Every structure is written in structure tokens, then in C-alpha cells.
Image (tube, rainbow, N blue to C red):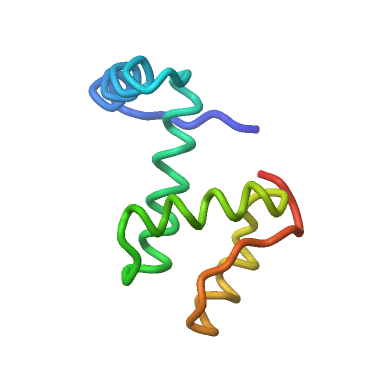
Amino acid sequence: MGIVKISDLMHENLRVAGNALSRSINAQAEHWMRVGMLTEMHPELDYREVCQLLIQAELSGGLDIAAAATAQSSGKPRASATGKR
């Protein structure tokens, strides 16, 4: 775990979104980072498909960036059971 510096405005956005969605500020930030990472890796997927991929990854033990990158090169997004966050 580390410390990430963000702007005051982003912190406030995280606070508002986290409260609205019953998440902590850290959980909301992690959610946005995971969605953003997968969106960059798989621009062909829409938000619903990204969320489905996150659910599949959670059921398989967590999202693994190395496995996600391998899936990207094969053209098929998939979850991995090789490690949890």
C-alpha cells in the first residue's frame, strides 16, 4: 500500500461519489482506477462490460494486471485467479 497525492477537487469528487455509492473514499478511488485501467486496456468494452469483467475477476480471486495484459494481446478480456489486489 502506498500514498497517492491527488488534488483537493479530486478528493472532494471521491468523497461525494463515495458517499452516494456507499463506498469509502479509498474504495471509490480504487474503483475508478480499476475501471480506468480496464478501459484503457480494452477500449472496445463499454462500462457494463468493464463492470462484468471486474465481477468475473473478483469471483476468480482478483484482478491481475499481467493476466489482463495477456488477455488484451489475445484479444479476449478475461479475469485471472493469480492474485487478489
Image quarter (top left, top right, bottom left or bottom right) of the C terminus: top right
Q: Residue at x 43, y 50 (%)?
A: 51
Asked whether, in this view, residue 20 is left or right of residue 54, the answer is left
Residue 84 position in % (x across, y down): 71, 46
Residue 4, relative to residue 52: is it above or below? above
Q: Residue at x 47, y 18 (%)?
A: 24
Judge by depth and name the residue closer to the eye, 41 or 78. 78
Judge by depth and name the residue closer to the eye, 83 or 58. 58
Residue 8 position in % (x across, y down): 28, 20
Most distant residue in the left direction: 9
Asked whether, in this view, residue 67 is left or right of residue 30, the answer is right
Residue 11 position in % (x across, y down): 33, 21
Residue 39 position in % (x across, y down): 37, 59
Q: Residue at x 72, y 49 (%)?
A: 61
Q: Residue at x 68, y 62 (%)?
A: 80
Residue 21 occupies which quadrant of the picture? top left
Q: How many marks?
A: 0
Residue 46, relative to residue 2: is it above or below? below
Residue 21, relative to residue 84: is it above or below? above
Residue 2 occupies which quadrant of the picture? top right
Image quarter (top left, top right, bottom left or bottom right) of the N terminus: top right
Most distant residue in the bottom direction: 74
